[in-house]
Amino acid sequence: MTVERRPGLREVIAGQTHICELDEQISRVFIYGYSLEELIEHHTYEETAYLTLYGELPPAGKPVFDPPDEGILRRTWASLGTEPQGAHPMGLLRSAMSSLGNQVEAAKPPVLTYEAEREASLFLTPHTGYLVGQVQRHSQGQEYVPPVAGYGYAENILTMFRGERPTEFEARAMDVALILYTEHEFNAGSFGVRVAASAHSDLYSSTIAGECILRGPRHGCANEEVMKILLDEGGDPEGVKKYCDDFFAQSGARMPGFGHAVYNLPQSFDPRVQILRPWVKELSRLKGDMRWYETILALEEYMAERMKPRVAAGNPNAPANMDLWTAPLYYLLNIPIPMYTPLFAASRIAGWAAHYLETRYVNNEALLRPRAEYIGPEPRPFQASPTHGAPAS
């Protein structure tokens, strides 16, 4: 059998999806036909999550998420209290998600139908964000702050983080970031969910597979690294330009906040950056602190100039991606840097659940089982063991 090998499965069509279209030719993202621009302009994260799970926007005037299940959340908080406070936040989130799944399934065994699992996904989505809030409180050694019925999803997450209600603009800025991270086709985490779903693993185990993959620095953590660079350089545009020069001097180095497996054509860019950038600018203005916005803008422009010779020579483009701009956004919202990646999970959970549903029920896909190209030693001659051969006749 002769097949074409593509490292990282780049440009390989590994399945079909109804959920999300990435059009790298025009740098646009669509969820069930709705552009991100439309969703940001007219809708909330709650409505975007519903769209991702149901394929249509929710009925007008009806709350999308049910009130928080305070009993279950109290028990997940107690379970989280047995974990080391200094553990990695993504590891704590993994444990909390497992606890949530165990409690839900123990209270009521899951009904394995598309409709029932879709309802279960609509419960899982906001409660994952509430677990992220619990992880933050636990990591800081703080008392539990429950989500408030009637608050928006983004508003509740920020309230749990801070212990006080955010401003309307802060909540909306957080909501915008959540919408932009909701779904992005066959990224590593979502594809991992599909592998688990193709084996008919359960909803919670399958989405935890995505969370586990997100912990790795090649899929998550980029905005954490961006913010560390900004702090190291003191919010100085010239300092980050030097950092960029040093990056280009290293062979094979990866610049956090730049590059994408899909948006790598000469004319491509990450459309989420275009949407998020003005929100960071306005939040910076309201906070009276423009240095992070100006430094990131300088780095983005300088990186684009440095990339031009590489692109002209036929190498893939590496435009700024969304992680570059969520770094200053989260920092201005007073979110601790180690919580940036868990916040990604609080958004992408709707996409992960949608991929679980699509793989298992909509497409009814076969078990994902690719082949490998063997590059090990040639077959070796058989040598009978003097002590472990066939039994004597």
Image (cartoon, rainbow, N blue to C red):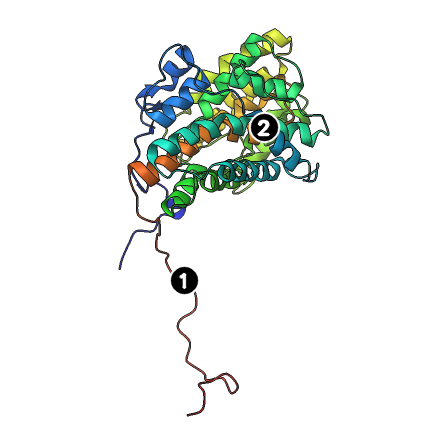
Q: Residues within 10 Å of mark 1 (few under 14, many from 20)?
A: few
Please state, as top left, top right, bottom left or bottom right, where the N terminus lies in the image.
Answer: bottom left
**Residue farthest to the front, as pictured:** 107
**Residue farthest to the left, as pictured:** 1
Q: Could one spot residue 226 in this view of the protein?
A: no
Query: Is label 1 or label 2 in front?
Result: 2
State the image coordinates of residue 297 (x, y, percent, origin top left): 54, 18
| Pick the front one: 279 or 115 | 115
Dot label at residue 375? 1
State the image coordinates of residue 299 (x, y, percent, origin top left): 55, 23
State the image coordinates of residue 293 (x, y, percent, origin top left): 58, 16
State the image coordinates of residue 246 (x, y, percent, origin top left): 59, 34
- Position of 352 relative to 156 (above/below): below
Q: Is residue 89 left or right of residue 186?
A: right
Dot label at residue 71? 2
Q: Amino acid at mark 2?
A: Gly
Q: Quadrant of residue 19?
A: top left
- Position of 198 relative to 3 (above/below): above
Q: Could one spot residue 171 in this view of the protein?
A: yes
Q: Residues within 10 Å of mark 2 (few under 14, many from 20)?
A: few
- Position of 116 relative to 65 (above/below): below
